[in-house]
Image: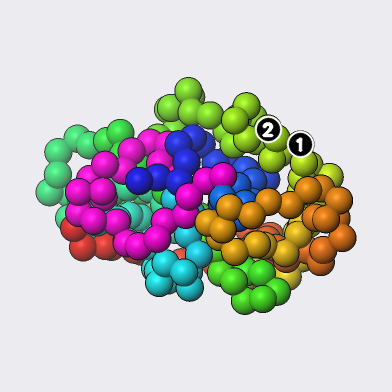
């Protein structure tokens, strides 16, 4: 179901997973999750998809989330139990956030990361984790992804620029994507000769918080 099991901590982690999907090493999500699949989401679940290919513009998982906050280059949400204003009716729980949401005890955190290629390809990543979980593998240190990491290490430099909005920048990172799930591969020499496609999100401090996301179960 998931594209990957682990903890996406940095932009380099996210870009590495995009690259692994591009060359067919990992599988992208092809359609919206079923109700059964939503219930299987757990700490470590990571999903990657191509917006056009999967027909998914807005990710839904049936959970309730707090308002988004920028954490590094990721939009981050915290799982909640009740809508605003209802927390006073609850007993001792996971504590209240600044927006008076009742955080779910042992609830998940959700991270969102998106990029746009020069060809207009929109790639998205959603990852879930529990802050107290420390045994999840980080993509850039995952032995099973080291061949991909070593091959592209010289072209995975992160370039961020300040921005007044949260739209992806066009700052390049590496080679033009091959068709997803094509099974095609490319050696490092050919990658170096191709124009780079990926941009990364702007500096977090320049982005305003996004309104709450209250998704139906």
**Residue 151 in view in this figure:** yes
Q: Is residue 69 magenta?
A: no
- Asked which quadrant contains residue 99, the reply is bottom left
Q: Are marks 2 and 1 in contact (CB under 8 Å)?
A: yes
Q: Which residue is mark 2?
A: 146
Q: Quadrant of residue 151?
A: top right
Residue 68: x percent and y percent? 44, 58
- Above or below 159: residue 162: below
| Residue 90, position as x, y percentages in the image | 14, 44
State the residue position of label 1: 150
Q: Residue 84, percent across and down?
A: 25, 59
Q: Quick one: 72 or 11, which is closer to the camera?
A: 11
Place of residue 34 in the rendered image (x, y in percent of width and height, measured from the top left): 23, 56
Question: Disc 2 versus disc 1: distance between alpha carbons?
Answer: 6 Å
Does any portion of residue 96 appear in the rendered image?
no
Q: Vertical placement of 51 versus 124: above or below?
A: below
- The residue drawn where x is 26% and y is 42% is 40
Residue at left 51%, top 36%? 7
| Total count of labels | 2
Label 2 sits on a secondary structure element that is helix
Please tell me whether the stretch drawn in magenta is mainly helix, strand or loop.
Answer: loop
Magenta span: 25-46
**In the image, what residue occupies the spot 64% across and 46% down?**
16
* Residue 43 is inside the magenta segment: yes
Dot 2 surroundings within 10 Å: few (below 14), some, or many (20 or more)? some
- Secondary element at tag 1: helix
- Mark 1 crowdedness (10 Å alpha carbons): few <14, some 14-19, many ≥20: few
Quarter holding residue 139: top right
Which quarter shows the C terminus?
Answer: bottom left
| Nearer-the-camera pick, 62 or 141 | 141
Residue 133 vs residue 119, the one in the foreground: 119
């Amino acid at each position: 179901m998931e594209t990957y099991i682990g903890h996406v901590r940095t932009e380099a982690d996210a870009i590495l997973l995009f690259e692994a999907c591009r060359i067919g090493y990992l599988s992208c999500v092809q359609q919206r999750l079923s109700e059964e699949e939503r219930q299987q989401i757990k700490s470590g679940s990571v999903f990657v998809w191509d917006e056009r290919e999967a027909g998914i513009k807005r990710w839904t998982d049936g959970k309730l989330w707090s308002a988004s906050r920028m954490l590094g280059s990721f939009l981050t949400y915290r799982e909640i139990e009740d809508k605003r204003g209802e927390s006073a009716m609850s007993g001792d729980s996971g504590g209240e956030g600044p927006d008076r949401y009742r955080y779910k005890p042992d609830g998940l955190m959700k991270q969102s990361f998106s990029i746009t290629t020069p060809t207009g390809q929109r790639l998205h990543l959603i990852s879930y984790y529990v802050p107290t979980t420390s045994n999840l593998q980080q993509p850039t240190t995952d032995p099973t992804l080291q061949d991909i990491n070593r091959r592209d290490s010289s072209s995975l430099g992160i370039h961020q620029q300040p921005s007044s909005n949260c739209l992806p920048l066009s700052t390049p990172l590496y080679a033009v994507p091959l068709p997803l799930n094509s099974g095609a591969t490319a050696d490092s020499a050919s990658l170096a000769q191709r124009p780079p496609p990926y941009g990364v999100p702007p500096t977090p401090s320049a982005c305003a918080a996004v309104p709450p996301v209250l998704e139906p179960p």
